[in-house]
Amino acid sequence: MNIFIRALSVAILIIPISSSAENHLSQPESVTFDTLQSRWLVSNIGDGNIIEIDSQGNQNILISMPGRAYGNCIVNDIFYVSRGTLLYGYDLVGDSEVVSLPLPAINSLDGMDADTSGFLYIVDTGGRILKVDLSNYTFSLFVSSGMASSTQDCIFDRAHNRLLIAGYSMNAPVQAVNLEDSTISNLIFTAEGYFDGITIDQYGYVYLSATQTGQIIRYDSAFQEKMVFSSGITWPAGIHYNQRDHILGIPDFYADDVKLVVDVYHNDDDDDGIVDIDDNCPYEPNPEQEDFDNDNHGDVCDNCPLLFNANQSDDDNDEVGNLCDNCQDHANPLQEDADSDLVGDSCDNCIDVSNPDQADSDGDGIGNACEYICGDSNNDLLVNVSDAVHIINFIFLGGEAPDPFKAGDVNCDSIVNISDAVWIINHIFIGGNHPCDLDGDSIKDC
């Protein structure tokens, strides 16, 4: 059989465990998603507890029991979990126990899944599969031999009316069990092996926990196409695919963690008809995928839509990309620029006078274009009686205005009038306060 292997990267969303809460995970072995209450349910081998994790990553001990909890699944709002040679069932609404069924396991019961006819199939790691009638909790031995070594988990493949089996051994095959006659076939032999979990999505893709490589391997339904769906996991155990939200739950056994990985190949967060992996704006609807600058970021989410900026750098986090930002180090999402010098007001050293070069010879943070001496109304770099005369001519004879205008406002009242001329004369001839120094402390007040 020829296998086509795809080396593709996936975007991972890991919903974190609440940093303010205690981590109740202890060697998590199996996980399933409770659609009814939008929570993940995890069985611990370490302490036997069942842990619920809500949509915010907060944990709670749902069921506390001594011993070890192995595989689990949900059927008709009943949460089933295997514990050694016992099958337990709990009502999801009240979390009360509804069944405790002893089963003749050679080793230990582990992974399980149900078909659409009311039967639950449970793996015995001794190489067998038990079949439980959920209507009356009677059971039978469904498969007694022919399984791969150290069988770990199973999943119901509805499209082919079969169970898919994962085993923990070198180069373990993925096996299929026909539900009509319980015959076994080897679908594919793998290079990874040592599988601890198996699950399937609504599109027929099969996911396997490869413990030795720390990966989740995905096959298409025909087992012709293979890819690494997720990697970097310490020890992936009994996985589950949340078909509602397109999220794969991965218990990381030795890390005491559960990773939730978004399936970007099928998920469409913004509901624009384009799956996330192909969407140039996965979180903002843009069915036409407009991308003016061809940087692979759609216009509706591109922080610089007219200039190519594939890395979307935004140093000041104002949602305007550096290449388009008129103040790269000062947040200014509205990009105000009063003097139209292409330097934004929030970082312009001369807001009201155009000075694109931002020259500032004395390094005082005020651009040369805005530098002035308070009282130097005629802009000759001196404060003398000529400035008082200049102001008087402006007020009474329509002469030139002070340059800049605020240089003539020596008493800081925001207007230029005869009081400013008097202030200058008092300063020059009788030792009055310096222009703009209202309290005489030699520091400008405006």
Image: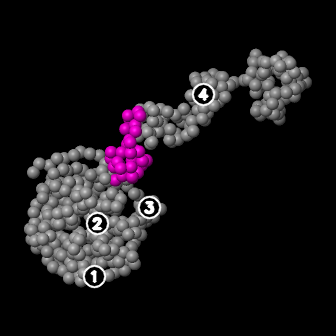
Mark positioned earlier in the residue sequence (4 or 3): 3
Q: Which residue is mark 3?
A: 56
The amino acid on which the numbered mark 3 sits, given as a three-letter code, is Gln
* Magenta residues, start to end: 267-296
Look at mark 4 in the image and give the residue it sits on.
340
Which residue position is annotated with label 1?
100
Q: Residues within 10 Å of mark 4 (few under 14, many from 20)?
A: some
**Circle 1: element type:** strand
**For mark 2, does the 10 Å Cα neighbourhood hold few (<14), some (14 to 19), or many (20 or more) residues?**
many
Residue shown at the point (17%, 63%) measured from the top left: 160
* Residue 243 location (% of width, % of height): 31, 61
Residue at position x 83%, y 16% from top?
386
Report the side of 390 relative to 364 (left or right).
right
Q: Name the residue located 20 percent from the left edge and 50 percent from the top edge.
A: 226
Camera-side mark, 2 or 4: 4
- Above or below 114: residue 320: above
Q: Which residue is mark 2?
A: 29
- Local packing at callout 3 (Cα closer than 10 Å; few below 14, some 14-19, many 20+) is few
Distance between the Cα atoms at labels 4 and 3? Answer: 46 Å
Amino acid on which the number 2 mark rests in the picture = Glu
Q: Position of residue 357 (x, y in %)?
A: 58, 23
Mark 1: which amino acid? Answer: Ser
* 19 magenta-colored: no
Labelled pair 2, 3 in contact (Cβ < 8 Å)? no
